[in-house]
Amino acid sequence: MTTKKLSRRGLLKGAAAAGAATAFPAPMIWAQNIKDVTLRQFGTGVSNLNEVAQKVKEDLGFTLEMTALDSDAVTQRAATQPGSFDIADIEYWICKKVWPTGNLQAMDVSKIKNYDKIVGIFKDGKLTPESTIAQGTAPHTVGFTDGPDGTTFADQQTNWMTLIPTIYNADTLGIRPDLIGRPIDTWAELLNPEFKGKASILDISSIGIMDAAMVCEAMGEIAYGDKGNMTREEIDKTMAIFTEAKRAGQFRAFWKTFDESVNLMASGEVVIQSMWSPAITAVKSRGIDCVYQPLKEGYRSWGGGIGLSKNLSGLELDAAYEYINWYLDGWVGGFLMRQGYYSAVPETSKNFMSENEWGYWFEGKEATDTITNPFGDAMAQAGEVRDGGSFEERMGSVACWNAVMDENQYMVRKWNEFIAA
Amino acid sequence: MRAGENNRHLTGWLLASPLTLVLIFFLVLPIAMIVVVSFWKATEFSIIPAFSWENYDFLFGSPVTYRVFGNTIKYALIVWACTLLIGFTVAYFLAFHVRTQTWQIALFLLCTIPFWTSNIIRMISWIPFLGRNGLANSALISAGITDEPLEWLLYSDFSVILAFVHLYTLFMVVPIFNTMMRIDKSLIEAAYDGGASGFQTLTNVIIPLCKPGIMIGTIFVVTLVMGDFVTVRFMSGSQSANVGRLIQNDIALLQYPSASATAVVLLITVLMVIGILLRFVDIRKEL
């Protein structure tokens, strides 16, 4: 961290002493009251970190309780236990399942201080004015609703957001270059018989089917209308190709949790598989060569955001807005970017990163010194560049977003058949 | 006299009521709920109370269901046979070959030591052992038995069954050992005196007298294996499925009605298996 910022808590104290409102557009919050507030947040392990909760206590004064769950458990909890949380840290594709339950409330954009600085992907779907919008459930398509009580998604930006974007990344295949020994540049390699018994894919249907589609399209077997919203026929064809490969012994195993994917790769059971970026880092940190391979067909991307429980009101709601504004203010962004994810407001994160870190993680420049993650582990040495290059290069070659399809139920059943085949 | 009898009735009811209430609340009601929900409908984000055969239609209409139930029964049968063979041998050794009671108890406790750790840990510890570069394969290769690592050791039916047998054999040992200890030793002496060979004594005296133990062990093992989903998922690397995994998948995807329907069918299957087993032995009489 290079820049020193005035702590929010200090500001709040000053504000309270003066008997005035806080310096931010949120309604009046008194420092003494807010200390008693406890907000319960849950979400996936990627962003539900105790460090964030600690920093919230330091900067804002209230208590944030974090619960980290896996994607399926997150969906279940958001959909079925509305009383059990105040803040839901969920992924955009999950939003499509959860929003219609009415367990979340829309957020007033005018209260979001850094709204204008949020990257275009989450507002109109475009990274740059010229970029085309990728297939799948692109975040902006489920990012807005018509009003405070809207239950459907709006087509364009409105004053009411469903989730405040926080974190996102571009995913691709992970490989073991030491065990493969040649360049890999296409998704089709996942089903290459050369890697028979040494390939893997993840067993979370909504994400797995997207990876499968990237592979089938790269093989030239199927031309999809929209990979993120397949027809029954497209689903059948995709699963037929993968079932055939499974029967022929292409896959070593399927993985469902982060740790499983790390172990499969680190132990050499698998040399090529769909993987998540921090899992690659975990393999690397064991001293094993592992690459997050950019592929010519592009990336499969995902994004996460925070939503507010319907039950939040009064002081708690104000505290939640404080929290959101603080979230987009840069400290968390820097924390997440130093793990290889992207922040929804990169501009502010820059203030919390060194020039070397910013150059490596965001601009795709060579590291000038050792790059460490927020936990102090070395991620790259001087001279290394990030896989896939800069932010624009990586997020600019997203081919599709994790999605929930119209034929989701049919897809799930077909996926179950694939697993049982 | 009348009052006393009434009193006795009342006391009986009162004595039975705590257990009855516990069973109603924690067994009968949940199962009834599952049966009710199994007739409901569901979409991605909502469960609709209705009366529909849709879930059962889909369940019985899908070839996957039959394959998965077949797989479940296959696992149950193979695991049952292995645990019975190993469990019976271990119990036999403990009961008839170990002379002193101190040693019997000591060795019996030895059998239970692995069960002081959690199920999951015992299961997962097999994964690095059986892996491509694991201990088993390195040992086989360095001993010159194989040239290449054996792929089928891990993430296969073999590893699933191995883990099951490892996890559940004790459930066979304990009840069989228990019944063996109650066999009157003079019966065995009588068999020998009557000129029976060791094998004849085993088949004509010991096994029939152990039947209740075998049956209780069988019920344990069969129900545990049929309801398990964790072992199958981890040890097959998610490559095989049994009914438990089908239910787990449905729950993970918020398809509660469909999960309930599968659970009801599984419950009926297990009850049928136990019903058949109980025809062979009247456990209450034998105990």
Image (spheres, coloured by chain):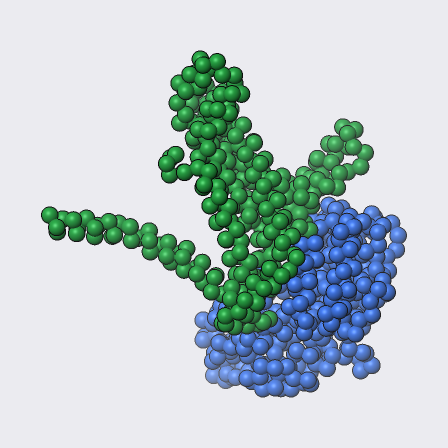
Chain colours: A blue, B green
Is residue B240 in view? yes
Residue in front for this viewpoint, A250 or A127: A250
For residue A118, above or below residue B110:
below
Q: Residue at x 50, y 23 (%)?
A: B202
Name the image quarter holding the N terminus of chain A: bottom right
Image position, residue B119 (x, y; %): 55, 44
Image position, residue A178 (x, y; %): 83, 48
Residue in front for this viewpoint, A109 or B162: B162
Q: Which residue is drawn at 74% across and 61% down?
A: A239
Image position, residue A124 (x, y; %): 73, 82
Figure disc tally = 0
Image position, residue A158 (x, y; %): 64, 86
Q: Which residue reaches farthest left?
A: B1
Q: In this view, does A11 lie to the left or right of A352?
A: left
Is residue A323 in view? no
For residue B114, above or below residue A292:
above
Q: Which residue is drawn at 80% across and 78% down?
A: A132
Residue in front for this viewpoint, A256 or B184: B184
Q: In which quarter of the image is residue A7?
A: bottom right
Q: Residue at x 57, y 65 (%)?
A: B55
